[in-house]
Amino acid sequence: MKFGNVVSEWNRNINDNLKDGAYRTLVENGVKEENIFVKYVPGSFELPLGASLYLEFNDEMDGVICLGSVIQGETRHFEFVCQAAAQGVKDVAIKFNKPVIFGLLTDNTMQQSIDRSGGKHGNKGIECAIACMKMIELKKSF
């Protein structure tokens, strides 16, 4: 299986933890390192386009994991970015009929993001890698 990881550069310390968790999980489950690809996009808003580009230009890609984090601020920007990223990831999955996993942390504080990217609440990157593998297997079962 081949996996694309699209990772937001914004909040890079958090997102690299998510990426590392996803990578380790894929390798631990038998995915060859040369079949795991990583591309960075400027922010979480760009995650759907990054996923779409992976699938458009690489027919052999089995699934894409989108990883990022958006932390609530004082403006409505948080809402717009989160909503657009969620809808966009869903749209790409449907367009290409392949698993595109939504691994966007949408937290109120930096500490919550730290806790969910390898801290006391685990690593959501791991959960996203597992979800992607399960969805690929589901697709194969049809």
Image (cartoon, helix red, strand yellow):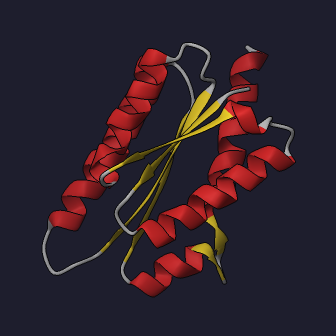
Q: Quadrant of residue 105?
A: bottom left
Q: Position of residue 51 (x, y in %)?
A: 43, 33
In this view, which residue lies farthest toward the left? Answer: 75
Q: Position of residue 8 (x, y in %)?
A: 40, 54
Q: Residue at x 24, y 56 (%)?
A: 81
Q: In the rendered view, tell whether residue 99 sits above or below residue 112.
A: above
In this view, which residue lies farthest toward the front? Answer: 34
Q: Quadrant of residue 30?
A: top right
Q: Position of residue 27 (x, y in %)?
A: 80, 45
Q: Residue at x 52, y 17 (%)?
A: 58
* Quadrant occupied by the N terminus: top right
Q: In the rendered view, tell whether residue 15 sits above or below residue 64.
A: below
In the image, taking residue 30 as reference, residue 17 lies left or right, namely: left
* Quadrant occupied by the C terminus: top right
Q: In the rendered view, tell whether residue 51 sits above or below residue 66.
A: above
Q: Residue at x 65, y 67 (%)?
A: 123
Q: Residue at x 85, y 44 (%)?
A: 29
In the image, taking residue 97 as reference, residue 85 lies left or right, namely: left
Image label count:
0
Q: Position of residue 7 (x, y in %)?
A: 46, 51
In the image, taking residue 10 as reference, residue 14 lies left or right, namely: right
Q: Quadrant of residue 136?
A: top right
